Image (cartoon, coloured by chain):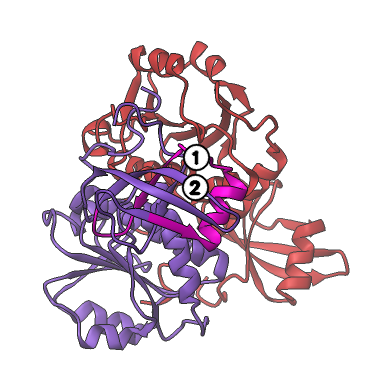
Chain colours: A purple, B red
Amino acid sequence: MDSTPPPRARLFVETPLIVGGVVTIEDKQAHYLTGVLRVSEGDTVALFNGHDGEWYTRVQAVAKRSVTLQLLACTRPHRLPPDHWLLFAPIKSGRIDLVVEKATELGVRGFGAVKTARTVVSRVNEDRLRAHAIEAAEQTGRVEVPELFPYRPLEAWLDRWPTERRLILCDETGQGAPPNVALPPHQGAPAALLIGPEGGFAPAELERLRALPYVVPMTLGPRVLRADTAAMAALTCLQLYLGDWEDKPAFRGSTSA
Amino acid sequence: MDSTPPPRARLFVETPLIVGGVVTIEDKQAHYLTGVLRVSEGDTVALFNGHDGEWYTRVQAVAKRSVTLQLLACTRPHRLPPDHWLLFAPIKSGRIDLVVEKATELGVRGFGAVKTARTVVSRVNEDRLRAHAIEAAEQTGRVEVPELFPYRPLEAWLDRWPTERRLILCDETGQGAPPNVALPPHQGAPAALLIGPEGGFAPAELERLRALPYVVPMTLGPRVLRADTAAMAALTCLQLYLGDWEDKPAFRGSTSA
């Protein structure tokens, strides 16, 4: 691979990636390659599809509405991030997009919006969230895209909760433990983070949550955090105590050392 | 204070806050109180000015372009967040606003934009950044606003660096230590976080930084983080290892328990 130039782009595709294969890129992704990046024959493009790792490809042909890529070699093996989920009460669209972007960069394996008693957002545009997750996965060097769970009420989640998965409740009333107490020592264990709506959880919700054996209330310091800030900060804590942050970057590692 | 209703707003003002005092709110803040919140006589508004703590006030009079507030009592003492600075290469305006907002919520004491070799943004709107910091301080329950340092080149910062302050270098090349190794055990010590531009630091900058005795290179896991994500995640780590996150919320603590 030494003679292969660094990739001009990293794209998520839904096709199998195999030695000798050819992939045709169409629609928005083709427009991005041709109209935005203006790739030409011989350029390198990286692809991933969520189960075959990352592959380098060479641009074989550029047409008006499509780009043909020839698969060269697998450059990184398949890898899943730590088994962390983010469940959040939906917030207004700019902020929810940001949460999805950051959660993808911060390495969640799955995420989903949760309807709580005080949730005021009635509709969640799941296609839009998925598109943001794909874009963030492309940018952050992941070889898969986090799973998007359907929008569901909190009770529906709790009624069939997989009890081996700890549910970290971001408790803005200050009754939880700080992250260094709440999170260790469960390195590598499945976990989920629950972020309430702007108005907080209702008292009955908090009561039910706190009584569940798999729920761990966590507090994030003395300042009030917006819901999106709480999500990013808590996901950082999950990575630190339960995740893979001791691993070195697998991507971009050589660009500026 | 038991009979005082919860404040309709929290505002930063530049006037002294003393027992028996009266404060007149004008301009944008008056418009916010009258046009957006529609406060009326007898409503409670919280004020802070950066050195006298937080005060509750009662709306005494509402005029077309001003609101008169009567100071009731100091409800929280003055308090500074941990002595952490955020220095960041400027990024495009939406993202830089977000960094200022999040850094304020995550408890930095001071922040400033830094010009690096690969910085492409030439101008930083300091008034705009300060306005964002004030708004975030009002929202997050701080009793002061983080200090904004003037936009300066990296060399100018390093040439007169206060060497007792550790400079945590967010090193996206992966050569730093993970936060749990890079940060402890310096609880309460002054620290600054340095975030490079989207294109990374130039090799000469990295070489100079790494040779300085007060610089600690830190790496944030195996995924590539955008500059704004790196800032938020690293500030979270600073709070966890060096900050005040073991303190309970001083504000909003009683709303939903």
Which is more toward the observer, B118 or A7?
A7
Q: Position of residue B191 (x, y in %)?
A: 39, 30
Q: Range of the magenta residues?
A: A23-52
Residue at image location 55% in from the left, 25% down from the top:
B118
Residue at image location 39% in from the left, 14% down from the top:
B207
Which is more toward the observer, A61 or A220?
A61
The three-letter amino acid code for the residue at tag 2 is Ala
Mark 2 to mark 1 CA distance (whole Å): 6 Å
SS label for mark 2:
strand
Residue holding disc 1: A41
Bin the neighbour count of mark 1 within 10 Å (Cα to Cα): few under 14, some 14-19, many 20 and up: few
Does B224 sit above or below residue B208?
below
Q: Is residue B15 visible?
A: yes
Q: Say if the magenta span includes residue A42.
A: yes
Q: Chain of mark 2?
A: A
Residue contact at pointers 2 and 1, CB within 8 angstroms = yes
